[in-house]
Image: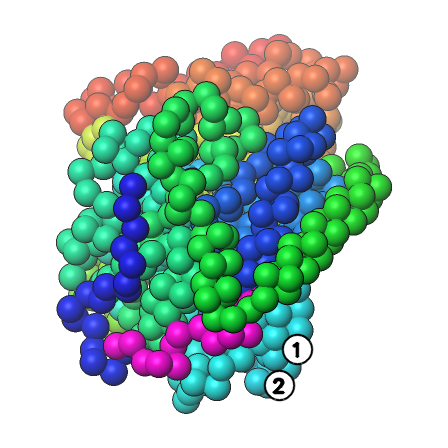
Amino acid sequence: MSTSPNATPEPSFSAASFLRPADAPDRPTLLRAYRLMRVASELAHLYEENKAVTSRYVHATARGHEAIQLAAAFHLRPTDYAAPYYRDDALLLGLGLTPYELMLQLMAKRDDPFSGGRTYYGHPSLRRPGFPTIPHQSSATGMQAIPATGMAHGIKYLESQGILKNEQSTTSNEQLEQPRLGGAANGIAQSSLFTDHSAKPVVLCSIGDGAMTEGEVSEALQMAVLHQLPIIYLVQDNDWGISATGREMRAMDAYEFAAGFKGLHRLRVDGADFGSSYTGLARAFDYVRRTRGPVLVHAKCPLLGHHTSGVRREWYRGDNLAAHTPLDPLPRLHQQLLNLGIAEAELQRFADDARALVLADYQRALAAPSPDPATFADHEFAPPAVTQETGERAPAGAEKVLMVDAALHAVDEILSEFPEALLYGQDVGGELGGVFREAALLAKKYGDARVFNTPIQEAYIVGSTAGMSAVGAKAIVEIQFADYIWPGLNQLVEELSKSCYLSNGQFPVQSLIRVPVGAYGGGGPYHSGSIESTLLTIRGIKVVYPSNAADMKGLLRSAFLDPNPVVLLEHKGLYWSKVPGTEDAKTLEPAAGYVIPLGKAAVAQAADPEQLRRGATCVVIAYGMGVHWAKTASRPFAGQVEILDLRTLNPLDFEAVEAAVRTHSKVLVLTEEPLLNSFAESLAGRIQRTCYWDLDAPVFTLGAANLPAIALNVDLERQMLPTPEKVAAALAELLKF
């Protein structure tokens, strides 16, 4: 393993960003770094010495990476944002977190400031005055790149509109220089760094070299270059990915790989040397603050600790550890300080103080309380913004509107009212305005900064909304067809759905993801799919599914206002009411501002009271297209069929379901999805369990045939899917009980 002794610039760096004497660390900064390296070293040593206790929960430490991590921490401001990775405990010390706070997370204690004992060591979530904002990131390797880039994207957008708000932005230089564990000024006491652009926020995305081969990282780099976003990708390269070496994992290192992204400026530093790291990062931060464009910093580091406490170095490292040991940044900095005339005795005092601090904090952390088990379910969601239906659903003089236009009008009203809102996805910008014209003319009205096309990158479309939310931007995004959502599921599951829960409520993700779904006559296998059952296995997201224009408008606005991730499923066959039997999807258009609370079902068709008195009724529980199939199918059974439109699938209005079942005692659960193992079957089972004594018949279910795709030929499609005729046959059988 070799390290580069000097910071090597990408040729396209401007002359103004070249090395300046003031960029080099001064004596106080070097001593601060040494003190914190000692603390980081003592932490790793203590964890190893007490592994029977500390390895109860998996952890990794920064050993070998301390120089580059501390250098990065010293350049971050309270107005900045950071996305660390799991080995960045030295970076957290450099920001001013204490060993005690880190050990609270190590031991999964109640007062863990990041997650309250819910997630691993080195997985910070932090909103604290005087510190950079650190949103939640998962352990899925490399997955932080997209939300981090989304943060930079949101900052760029908010800056372009003149509405960037940061509660830290009024912090004075004097306040910045107040000491914390990380030292005065968080490492930025040198006046050369306080320039006219110094308050502009930067996003730091820290990432291991092994993660750079992830496809989602390439999506992030592509968007950072395409939109010239204010982000630094700090790649810590120790030449290992668990037990796989660099030569096994990659054809080139991250610096060489980044050359393919034209407009992404590159920098190499010796990540084991604090001076090289500090100087290189000074230039990188200065460049991004001034130009608002992206930089990748490649830092070569030794790996001196274990991969994690669960994958120990002695199992696979062999002689490689001996090759890495001479590159240890701590003795290198120690010798450099001796060369500057710092006495050995003074450095020893730093070592003694670090050991005493870590030992004392360890004892405190051991004695700290564990979480109250009664709180285990707290913070699945942030409290909803809309709790009751308000506004005019059918205002005087209103005209009927198609469902697709109701959605368009709802988004238009949101963009007009909320300057922090923006809309993006494949083909939603420019002239087209969506393949279904569901965003028609919005780009022309609001500009390309607010309504824009993305590359074919479902992961970025979904995952970037987490970053947008963290900086105060409110994203509405679109997946062009439900059949293409699968590349975005990793971000939806790992980054969006878990953020509120694992950050102990600090970082709910406000995200509205629009997804056209369903068959509409000849769409074929990749434009006709239904995906709600898959989505409903993901906890921490809400799933909404309107069946008519009025509900579309009210639910879309509520979904936007909700502080949690919401997937809005929009049936293509209902967009224009052209499919026979869907005429009722066209309704009077509600007034602007109309909202329907998520999680509230509605009766789409009531049964006749006389038929109900005679016990001759049933209820169909449906949503989306199923509501219209049921309406058509019920015509031969005048007054005998009530239809309950769920409208929201999670949270589910199960109280309304139970009330309807107990009223009618006969129930059909209807879905467009293949029935086997579906949401509909799950709901039927739940009804059977809770309403057993109220039932006069088995719970009926009806859905599509259990096949992997919908065929292109319309006759084959019709054979596979429910139809009004199939629903009518089920109703006839059910009503005989």
Q: Is 403 or 423 nearer to us in this picture? A: 423
User: In the structure shown, which secondary structural element does the residue marked by tag 1 occupy?
Assistant: loop
Residue 694 at x, y = what percent? 74, 19
Q: Quadrant of residue 242?
A: top left
Indicate the secondary structure of the residue bearing disc 2.
Answer: helix
22 is within the stretch colored magenta: yes
Q: Is residue 504 magenta?
A: no
Q: Which mark is residue 174?
A: 2
Circle 1 crowding by C-alpha within 10 Å: few under 14, some 14–19, many from 20: few
Badge 2, how many Cα within 10 Å: few under 14, some, many 20+?
Answer: few
Please provide percent x and percent y for residue 49. 66, 33
Residues at marks 1 and 2 touching, judged by CB atoms closer than 8 Å: yes
At x 23% / y 33%, what residue is drawn? 247
Q: Is residue 671 left or right of residue 389?
A: left
Find the magenta span and give its range.
Answer: 18-32
Image side of residue 690 versus residue 165, left or right: right
Note whether residue 255 is visible: yes
Q: Is residue 541 visible?
A: no
Q: Is residue 487 above or below residue 713?
A: below
Residue 26 higher or lower than 511, as above or below: below
Q: Residue at x 60, y 79 (%)?
A: 176
Q: CA distance from mark 1 to mark 2?
A: 7 Å
Specify the amino acid type for callout 2: Glu
In which quadrant is the C terminus drawn?
A: top right
Q: Nearer the viewer, residue 404 or 439?
A: 439
Residue under the image location 66 percent in, 17 percent down: 688
Q: Which residue is mark 1?
A: 178
**Residue type at mark 1?**
Gln
**In the picture, residue 228 is in which quadrant?**
bottom left
